[in-house]
Image (cartoon, rainbow, N blue to C red):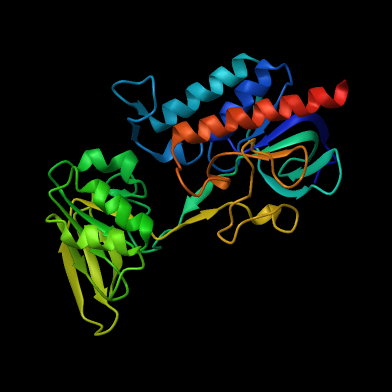
Amino acid sequence: MSTNETHVKVLILGSGPAGLSAALYAARAELAPVVLTGMQLGGQAALTHTIENYPGFPTGVGGPELGELFQKQAEHFGAKVEFDMAHEVDLSQRPFKVVTDTGEYTADTLILSTGANPTHLNVPGEVELTGRGVSYCATCDGWFFKDKKVVVVGGGDSAIEESLFITRYASSVTVIHRRDELRASPILQKRAKAHPKMNFIWDTVVTEVVGTEKVDTLKLKNIKTGAESTYDTDGLFIFIGHVPNSQMFKGQLEISDLGHILVNDKMETSVPGVYAAGEIADPHFRQVVTSAGMGAAAAIQATRFLEAESE
């Protein structure tokens, strides 16, 4: 590793809507923030084909395009976006230290917006058909399945909430669950079971997603009997959990049982000068607009923190 060390006032980890919104606000406060992109420029949002619920785009906007617009706007005001990835952080003293692929950064304040990744089934065809029938977000993609047959995998609250949401569009929603009962709350279960468009396949897992241009068929296996079958569908929504990318901060920040960094209403973490925004700190909403708002709030708070110090 090179001994390439750079000092910055505001270092932002992650380049999704939270990170780039934070960069915009910090740049406008003339703090010359640096954003480390991580693996995916634009974060999870950049993997969404079309985003139709972000204000200001009446006909929708491509996920990658929105990320690019966020980036350009932040750079216009002086933010620097580096294609680099953090591996290690030391939050025990200030300036905070961050080790990356290319060297080391020290930072007076840190904004953590490393996001969360949906848990995958890890079956053949899933990755290849993501965005072409395989989705992890009903509010992003439900509309594309108007009058189509859809399958949802999962049995918890989010799986059933999202299934009920998709019934607004799809002609039928079939929930496939590996157990013989749902884990979702009783009220959600009741609504789902009473819904005329919803069906259930129990004790079953998806073993393969089949399709060339788009999802056509799922291969299924009953885990009690071992019986294998196929099921034709236009779409597959997977809701078996999200994993916040918080492993790097364990033992240094307060983190929830589910892995989210705990923040207060000012996006402050348990370490003064360290803020978290977006899905890394948001178990509830996980929308582009809420992540952007959290990023803006984190940057405003970081600005005030630095101002108070220099007085």
Q: Nearer the viewer, residue 273 or 70?
A: 273
**x%, y% of residue 249?**
70, 52
Q: Quadrant of residue 125?
A: bottom left
Q: Is residue 72 visible?
A: yes
- Left or right: 249 with respect to 230? right
**x%, y% of residue 168?**
19, 43
Residue found 55% across the figure and 40% down from its top: 278
Residue found 18% across the figure and 42% down from its top: 169
Query: Where 211 falls versus 69 (above or below)?
Result: below
Q: Nearer the viewer, residue 38 or 204?
A: 204
- Left or right: 144 with respect to 81? left
Query: Where 171 falls versus 16 (above or below)?
Result: below
Q: Is residue 78 visible?
A: no
Query: The C terminus appears in which quarter of the rendering?
Result: top right
**x%, y% of residue 14?**
60, 38
Residue found 37% across the figure and 58% down from its top: 157
**Numbered label tally:** 0
Query: Where 199 falls versus 291 (above or below)?
Result: below
Q: Nearer the viewer, residue 149 or 217?
A: 149
Q: Residue furthest front?
A: 187
**x%, y% of residue 194?**
16, 60
Q: Quadrant of residue 287?
A: top left
